Amino acid sequence: MASRRRLVVVSNRLPVRRVRRGGSTAWEQSPGGLVTALAPILKSARGAWIGWAGGSGRAPAPFTLEGVRYTPVSLSRGQLEDFYEGFSNRTLWPLYHDAVRAPEFRRRWWWPYVDVNRKYAEAAAATAKRGDLVWVHDYHLQLVPAMLRELRPDVRIAFFLHIPFPPDELFAHMPWRSQIIEGLLGADLIGFQTPTGVRHFMATARRVAGVHGSRGTLSTGGRHVRVGAYPISIDLAAFDRLARAPETAARLHRLRVRLGRDRRVILGVDRLDYSKGIDARLKAVAELLTSGRATPADTVFVQVAVPSRESVKEYAELREEVERLVGRINGEFGEPGLAPVHYLHRGLPQAELVSHYLAADVMLVTPFRDGMNLVAKEYVACRTDDTGALVLSEFAGAAHELKAALMVNPHDVDGLAAGIDAALHMPHAEGARRMRSLRRAVRHNTVFDWADEYLGAAWS
Ligand code: GDG
């Protein structure tokens, strides 16, 4: 019954961008694992995607791109400030990331969050047909499942949270905790990145909404809501292909020559976000240089920090802190022509990103908390010759699968420095054994497996 299997995806942002072509502008799919995995499914299921397309004011008209129907949602300047920068990124984001920055609970951000969620729910209700599956994504839209159920009890509803779900006692701080839990419970399936997220959510749902259930099913209002862990992943084949491409070899060669062929390369790649532990790893690098375990002549640290949420105060402060640390390390330990830290405050084209992964003897993924962390998986996917070492925070969702990484606690600067040192001196055989095991883990669960598993559960 093809009509029953239609999929409507709802996410804060549409995975598209406007590009200039000739004298006019056109829409283009932006690169990313989620859209790569879902585009073929949406295309064959004549599916649709609803989300914000950037900008404020009137939304652009719906359009079709590579067989997928995109419906932009409009957000006003005020909604962007209160719903997006405020409630989503200054309340929910820090609260769900273990409160590594204090979440702000402002009453004037709550109603815009409700209004914008209703707008997405109405757009989904207007698009979905009877029996369709509507898949709602992420923390910006947690009220949509219940709002949509109210409007359209005849569709199936699934929700996936890309970021961690916090422990019960932390979530309890949220003034609108019951509204959020009830919003989520409107779904038929709620997916989290890890079993820990599932556990936290089940505990909170029992306490806040008084629902019953165990073993991945909750009962509420005469319905069953399934709750499960579905760890997201990457398009392994795409990274494998890029890593083996002849142009990549040439790019890698140029990069290694510029970084110094005899130096060991340590790499970090993140959005410039305080959850990612960029400051912690800079302190650990400083510790290695201070203790003489690394010198600017034998080791170089490259940090790619992609600008993110720059209008949010905490992000501007983090940028200052990171740049101060980089300046201090280079000032203290650098020599003319030999900077121990290279800091790039920009995103790289994907082919360039892959040559950085290939240039890195050691990859540092050290978030204080992270839903999954795709960078860790991408690094592993690119290491086709089983070389390289991954230093991974035990607080990244990816740590559940990438067990052969060198695990670290980013709050412990000495332990982190010791982990990096161990990675730099890892015996070849042990490094290869670990990398083979990491590669098996990524092969075992690609983004296509993730989408299959999740959608299989949502449709059943
Ligand atoms: C959220 C959750 C969860 C980064 N720098 C460049 C670049 N990137 C790409 C990477 C990777 C993506 O951005 C970052 O993904 P992460 O998973 O690390 O992080 P978030 O943005 O925080 O995503 C996270 C994810 O959702 C998925 O569910 O894993 O836990 O926080 O794909 O490759 N890409 C390019 N140049 C760069 O400089 N081209």
Image (cartoon, rainbow, N blue to C red):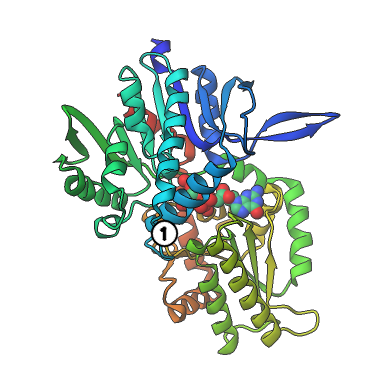
Q: Which residue is mark 1?
A: 104
Location of residue 144 in the rendering, given as x and y in whole percent from the top left corner: 38, 33
Looking at the image, which residue is at 35% across and 27% down? Answer: 157
Above or below, comparing residue 233 to residue 15 in the picture? below
425 or 121: nearer the viewer: 121
| Other-residue count near label 1 (Cα within 10 Å), few / some / many at <14 / 14–19 / ≥20 | some
Above or below, comparing residue 352 to residue 415 in the picture? above
Q: Considering the image in quadrants, where does the C terminus appear?
A: top left
Location of residue 83 in the rendering, given as x and y in whole percent from the top left corner: 48, 45
Looking at the image, which residue is at 52% across and 78% down? Answer: 421
**Regarding mark 1 in the picture, which secondary structure is present there?**
loop
Residue 251 seen in the figure = yes
Looking at the image, which residue is at 36% across and 37% down? Answer: 143
Location of residue 266 in the rendering, given as x and y in whole percent from the top left corner: 61, 69
Q: Residue furthest bottom?
A: 291
Q: Quadrant of residue 414?
A: bottom left
Above or below, comparing residue 88 to residue 123 in the picture? below
Location of residue 366 in the rendering, given as x and y in whole percent from the top left corner: 48, 65
Disc 1 marks a residue whose amino acid type is Glu
Q: Considering the image in quadrants, where does the N terminus appear?
A: top left
